[in-house]
């Protein structure tokens, strides 16, 4: 028997999703975002599966160095930029691009002595109000980057959307308009589109798209599914039944005696819990997939186990495979039951979950 719980990752699904994203944005290069351990799918696994992506977006320098050590030679971009001046020589050595979004990062570049200039993506705040230079700062900062010998030319430009996952929200178009007006006529590559913008705001696709969650076959929009866009879920989170128990009406199960059976039934115990990253706050009724049907979680999710109501006449047995999410049960749907987003479910799996790369 394979170890459990485990996240089975489909190489074919990842490759199909990259192909589909290229079809959706045929005139753009693809910066595949693999931060947060490849959205829980395994950083190096994902990068090697989609090695024909034009580049990879990461949150931390440590992630970028893992990819270089793993033999990935494609363009790498630090989406949050560099935090320490002492790290700048590593960007030079390993040919890693960096975002510059704050005065402190600009000063580090101006005060350093580097053997070669670094490729910089200047981030502009057009409405997200999290990272990026204000519109009023743009000309001054851009000129400082132009005159800095440690910055390769041309300077690339980017912004990030606040509400692209709300296709009817006018803020996204206002952000696009503000950005386009600001950068008109300037050289260098441009990137605006995350997963949601790639799918729902085609005018924002530009030189590069930056798909994150969509690369893994998941929709970024609440109530939507990746399959609606021709994407395939790349992760199946599975475990096994470790017990099947007769359960009488009126009896409770689990911590706090939180759930009590209305009728005689059978309960199954699944070897997964919040210690593996499955949310403790999953409410009763959240489905799992077992032997071709949905069965509901009952009682509280504990550290190592959760309990499901199999039904009075169930024939399930110890060792049967349980899918927590995947092709049979979309992670977007599970997230809706729990009251969260699919991003959180796939990225919060703990090291106890074995990541199993499959064809």
Image (cartoon, rainbow, N blue to C red):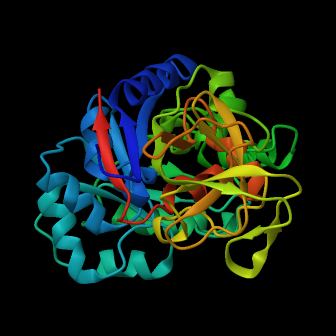
Q: Position of residue 1 (x, y in %)?
A: 28, 43
158 left or right of 44 in image = right
Q: Residue at x 31, y 74 (%)?
A: 109
Note whether residue 210 is visible: no
Decide which of 177, 23 is in the foreground and name it: 23
Q: Is residue 121 above or below residue 176?
A: below
Q: Position of residue 274 (x, y in %)?
A: 55, 69
Decide which of 263, 273 is in the foreground and name it: 263
Q: Quadrant of residue 124?
A: bottom right
163 left or right of 274 in image = right
Q: Position of residue 322 (x, y in %)?
A: 52, 42
Q: Is residue 207 above or below residue 280?
A: above
7 left or right of 329 in image = left
Q: Quadrant of residue 300?
A: bottom right
Q: Residue at x 17, y 43 (%)?
A: 73
Q: Position of residue 30 (x, y in %)?
A: 42, 33
Q: Quadrant of residue 192?
A: top right
């Amino acid at each position: 028997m394979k170890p459990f719980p485990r996240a089975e990752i489909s190489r074919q699904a990842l490759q199909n999703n990259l192909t589909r994203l290229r079809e959706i944005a045929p005139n753009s290069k693809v910066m595949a975002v693999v931060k947060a351990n490849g959205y829980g799918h395994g950083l190096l696994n994902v990068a090697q599966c989609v090695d024909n992506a034009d580049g990879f977006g990461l949150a931390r320098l440590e992630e970028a160095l893992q990819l270089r050590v793993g033999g990935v030679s494609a363009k790498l971009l630090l989406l949050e930029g560099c935090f320490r001046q002492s790290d700048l020589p590593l960007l030079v050595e390993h040919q890693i691009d960096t975002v510059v979004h704050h005065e402190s990062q600009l000063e580090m570049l101006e005060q350093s002595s580097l053997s070669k200039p670094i490729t910089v993506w200047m981030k502009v705040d057009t409405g997200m109000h999290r990272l990026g230079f204000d519109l009023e700062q743009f000309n001054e900062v851009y000129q400082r980057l132009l005159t800095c010998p440690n910055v390769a030319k041309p300077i690339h430009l980017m912004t990030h959307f606040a509400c692209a996952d709300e296709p009817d929200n006018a803020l996204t178009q206002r952000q696009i308009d503000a950005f386009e007006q600001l950068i008109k006529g300037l050289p260098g590559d441009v990137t605006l589109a995350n997963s949601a913008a790639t799918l729902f705001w085609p005018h924002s696709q530009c030189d590069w798209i930056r798909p994150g969650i969509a690369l893994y076959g998941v929709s970024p929009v609440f109530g939507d599914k990746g399959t609606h866009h021709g994407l395939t879920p790349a992760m199946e989170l599975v475990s096994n039944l470790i017990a099947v128990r007769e359960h009488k009406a009126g009896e409770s199960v689990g911590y706090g005696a939180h759930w009590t059976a209305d009728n005689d039934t059978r309960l199954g115990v699944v070897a997964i819990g919040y210690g593996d990253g499955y949310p403790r706050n999953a409410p009763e009724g959240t489905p799992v997939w077992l032997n071709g049907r949905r069965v509901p979680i009952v009682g509280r999710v504990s550290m190592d186990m959760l309990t499901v109501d199999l039904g009075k006449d169930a024939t399930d047995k110890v060792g049967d495979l349980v899918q927590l999410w995947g092709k049979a049960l979309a992670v977007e749907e599970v997230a809706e039951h729990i009251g969260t987003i699919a991003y959180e479910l796939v990225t919060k799996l703990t090291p106890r979950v074995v990541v199993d790369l499959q064809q």
